[in-house]
Structure formats: structure tokens, C-alpha cells
Amino acid sequence: MCGIIGYVGERSISDVLLKGLKRLEYRGYDSSGVAMFHGGMIEVHKAAGKIVGIETLLADRRQSGVEGGIGHTRWATHGAPNTKNAHPHRVQDIVLVHNGIIENYREIQKLVQSKGFTPKSETDSELFAFLVLFEMTDSKVDFIEAIRRSFLKISGNSSVVVMSERQPGLIVGIRNGSPLVASWNSEHGAMLASDAQPILDYTNQVHYLENYDMIVCRKSGIEFFDVHTAKPIKRPATKLDWSADRLDKNGYPHYMLKEIHEQARTILDTLNANFATSGGHIPFDFAPHPGLDQLSKTDRLSIVACGTSWHASLLGKFWFEKLAGLSVEAELASEFRYRSPVLKKNQVVMGVSQSGETADTLAVLQDVNKRGIPTMCISNVKGSTISREAKSAFYTYAGPEIGVASTKAFTGQILMMLLLAGKLGREAAMADSSGKAMIEIEKMYRELFELPHHLANGLLEESATSRATKAAALATQNSKGFFFVGRGYSFPIALEGALKLKEIAYVHAEGYAAGELKHGPIAMLEPDFAVVVLAPHDLWYEKTVSNLQEAKARGAKIIAVGHADDKLLPSMCDHFIPLPINTKKEDGKPVLSETLIPFLLAPIMQLFSYQIAVHKGTDVDQPRNLAKSVTVE
């Protein structure tokens, strides 16, 4: 979850490192530091807290040159979040940054102490530098070989980037588990980072390191080697369709708000990237994809994910079952991998991960691959570890998501699963000559291309939806706690709404299937408690309204979300948030199929949580204790 940046080139080293670290802030961190050559020596600057502390220390250090430097944002695991434990770590002339956990650190620590050394920090990371030192002094090998041998002596998922005063202009990185991405061109030099975002300011051509790859970076180029054999290997460049301008706030006060508003674009970009075009008409089928044949053959799908991605998977389960008649399990990856799941050859396991680096989800796919079961994934990052581990990958097109609390990536995930479910359902309808099913799915496709318009209108600051959301957040921000409840398609959105409020506002919130209120949770309700009721006019509307009345009778404050022309809900709640659509058009037909309502509900819940967080003054984009890419178990 830590962020790593390394650079060798002619640009100002401090500027490149600081800009890179700022691009990595979204990953979550509690301290930061940089190390760079200055006058033939390596200077190390570290600070607890935000990167502004490092900026202050580097105010007069704008030197450029070919010697290079490394930087790091740390999310504490071993040792408290303070300057002593911040990276980079130095052992004599060796300086390194590290991401991951060295599981056999106790054994290495005893070795270090037996040789008369005392580590300066409480971290496991510093110990790796001692291993490199011992290899160079005891085994008399060169710097690069010492790093390679040392890495083979540690266990656990780790990535390290190392430099030494003995080797100016050289940075060496090794990846196992925790991701590393590299780039080089004659203009900007060589760069190495935890992900592509710091590199996008200079190029969109990146090389993804595989597990047990070693990279040697010089101004003149980059070389890849196999850690086990020391033999040269090739890692071709991947061209990313992201651009640096999408990494900025573009006038919004927070990345999260910007990314909430970008969801209409996410829908359009994902539709256009996955649907085959058809002479300017609404297309009704996917562009060719190798994973589609595998998915069409399966009669059982297991979706594994964590956090927000798991909530997206629960919606996917609804759609795969309803539209495609496919048996689906939506599983928490952190639980699935430690069970003894019964897997059959004719089923598919799908991992869902925004970053494509989620450790538990990745571990499931790796284990399933060993068992010969087909795997696929949905990810927002091309070239990510999960997209390479899965036998086939489907991509969302949300662009870079900087806010730690996922918004537009969630929308991309649920859209991708809806499209896949619709694809399977359409195939089944064609095979069975089911005209009604075909009409319903094609109607849904048409509405998908109208959906961004409804969503964009609803998110306008002056819209009735946005104004009501802001007013409800302001009025209930000091509530003792929140329940988010819904039925059917709205249930996963209730779970996600509660998670968002916990993540960014640090408020107690729980999501429930509305029918479960009476089975225990209702005991919590009292006048200073708030219940957010997701009640669009769908199949479950009457039952949901009944559950609303149960909560209202206990004195809880009711925030209801429903269609704009609902006549009942406003009279039954304390705050009504209208969806940016009516129940029916003038011709009496539904404005939007109930299947698509989650694409409007989710952004409203995100905006509601955002407004409460803003009122409370929390750090919206970088909430405490959280990291964007969870690469440790």
C-alpha cells in the first residue's frame, strides 16, 4: 500500500520525486521521505505526516543530474508512523525504500544483531539493507548481485528499490507481489514507481514488472533480469489510455467530488470501449473478446472481491441471475481463499478489483489457476497484476481514480457486469427465440446510452437532486448513527452507502436489506438515529415503504430516496431526495428500467456521504487509516 518513486535523469531530482509522491498520495500514507544524490553523497530527508513536510525540507534542493533519487510514502505496518520508521532507510552507503512485509524479519534481525549491528528503526524494511551490505562485504559481490541474492533470502510479498553511494546514476528494483512499473525514454530518463500515475506526466508507455523481476535503471536505459537466474528478460511496454490531465482536480475542491461527477463519462467510455459499433445505430453486442466464449460456456460463476468491489459483485449476482439465468456466488476474497470451496471444471471464477492489485483477490485467482479452473477479472487498470494473472480480463474505463473512497470505479464495475449479464441473456434469448426477453434486453441497452444524461443532470449543483442531498446531509450530520436500507437492486447500494459514510466521515453506519430491520437492528432506532431508505418505484417498492414505516414509528429520522414524481414518500420522511427521473414518461412508459436505477442511487449516496464529510471537516480524499490499493493481506 506504500508508494514508491525512483528516478535517474537530467530533470530536477527533487521536483520529479515530489511530484511523483503527490501522485501516489491517494494510496494512503502516514509518513514520507526522499533520498537523492547531492555532491556525490546521498541525502535522506524524512517527515511524519503529509508530503508538505518534505517539500519544506527540500526548498533549496532543486538540483538536477544523472545520479538520481528515490522517494516513498509509508503506510505503517511494522513500527509507529514517525520519522524514525519513515523511508528511505540507510545502512552505511546503501539506501532503500520498500513496500510489503518481510515475513522472516525476526530471523534476519538476529543475524544483524549477531554481526554487531543495531537497526535504527522498528521496521522490517531496514533489515533488507543489512542483507545487501553483508553480501557485498562477506561474499565480495557487486551491488546489483548483492541485491539479487538478498532478495532471495526474504519471504513474503515485497518490492524494494535500492541505490548506493558506490553506484551513482544507478537504481535497482525488485518486485514480488507489491507492484512496480517502469518507463524510459531519452527525454525524461528512467523512472520506477508503484503504479503508472507518477509516470503519466512524462509518458504513457510503461513496463509492468512481473513477480521476481529485477530492473536496473540508468539514464541510458532500463534492463530486466530474472531474480532467480540473473538472466536478462524482456518486458514489453504497455500503452495506457490515461493522460496526466485526468490526474488533476480541474477546479473541484476534492478529487472525490470530481470523480463523482465523472461517472457519466465513465458510463459512456465503458459502453463505447466494449460495444461493437453498428453504422451509427445503438449496438447490441460486444466487441470480440476471448473471455466471452468462456463465460458463455459456464453454468456457474463465482465472483470474488473485497470492499466496494464486493458490493459491486452483489449487484452483478442479481443481474447475472435475472438476465442470464446463471448460477452465481458473490464471495469475499478474504474469506473464500481460506475456505475449502467446491470448484468444478465447468465454472468460472471472476476477480473484481479497481486497482488490479488487491492481495486477497489476487491470491484467489492464483490458487484457482493452479486447480485448472478458468479465471477472468474486471479491473480499471490495464497491465495490473490481476489482469495478467487472470486468463481473460475485462476493463472498465473510469480513468485514474485518486480519491481513496471509490466512486466512478464502482460505477464502471457494475456496468461491466451488467453488460456481461446482458450479453449472456441476449445469447440465450436468441437461442430460444424468446422475443420478449430480447426486446427487454435491447430496451435496456438503449436506456444505457440515455443514462449518462440523467446522471449528469442529477449531479448538477443546482439540480433538485443535489440540493436535496446537501440539505439532508447538513440536517443529519450529527446523528448518533445511520442505517442504509434497500431491497433487491438497492440492497448492495445500501451496503455501499454505509461504507462510504464510514470511510470518509468516520460516522457509524450500517447497510441492511430492508426486510432485516425487524430481525434485530430495529432495537437500535431512536430519535437521534437516521435511516436512509432507498425506495425507487420498483418491484420491491411497497415492501420497502412498509419497512420505512417501521423505522419511522421508532422515532428515527428518515431520509428517503425515490423517483422525482413519487407522491407518497415525501409525506412519510423527514428528508426526501428525488432521483433525477420520473416514474413514467408522458406516454406512460417507464423513464428508466428498474435494472438501471442503481446507477443513479450510487452517486447520490456518494454525494450524501461527501457532504457530511465536508461538514465535519475530515480529509475526504485521504481518509485516516485507509489505502487505495490494498496490497497486503
Image (spheres, helix red, strand yellow):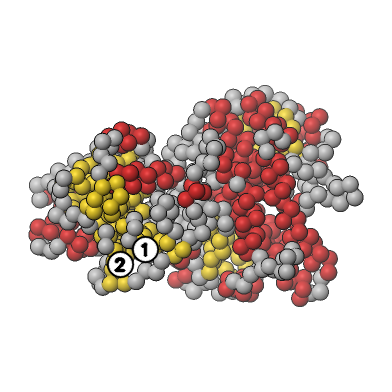
Q: Position of residue 223 (x, y in %)?
A: 29, 66
Q: Residue at x 25, y 39 (%)?
A: 61
Q: Give the spatial CA distance, label 2 vs label 1.
A: 9 Å
Which residue corresponds to mark 1? Answer: 209
Amino acid at circle 2: Phe
Q: Residues within 10 Å of mark 2 (few under 14, many from 20)?
A: many
Q: Residue at x 64, y 54 (%)?
A: 267
Secondary structure, mark 1, is loop
> Residue 188's image quarter?
bottom left
Residue 31 appears in the picture as rendered: yes
- Front in this rendered view, residue 508 or 171: 171
Residue at the front extreme of this rendering: 187
The answer to whether the residues at label 2 and label 1 have Cβ atoms under 8 Å apart is: yes
> Residue 604's image quarter?
top right
- Front in this rendered view, residue 244 or 131: 244
Q: Is residue 177 above or below residue 45?
A: below
Amino acid at circle 1: Leu
Which residue corresponds to mark 2? Answer: 224
Q: Which mark is residue 380?
A: none
Q: Position of residue 14 (x, y in %)?
A: 29, 43
Secondary structure, mark 2, is strand
Q: Residue at x 62, y 57 (%)?
A: 269
Q: Position of residue 17 (x, y in %)?
A: 32, 46
Task: State left or right for residue 308 relative to residue 299.
Answer: left
Residue at the right extreme of this rendering: 587
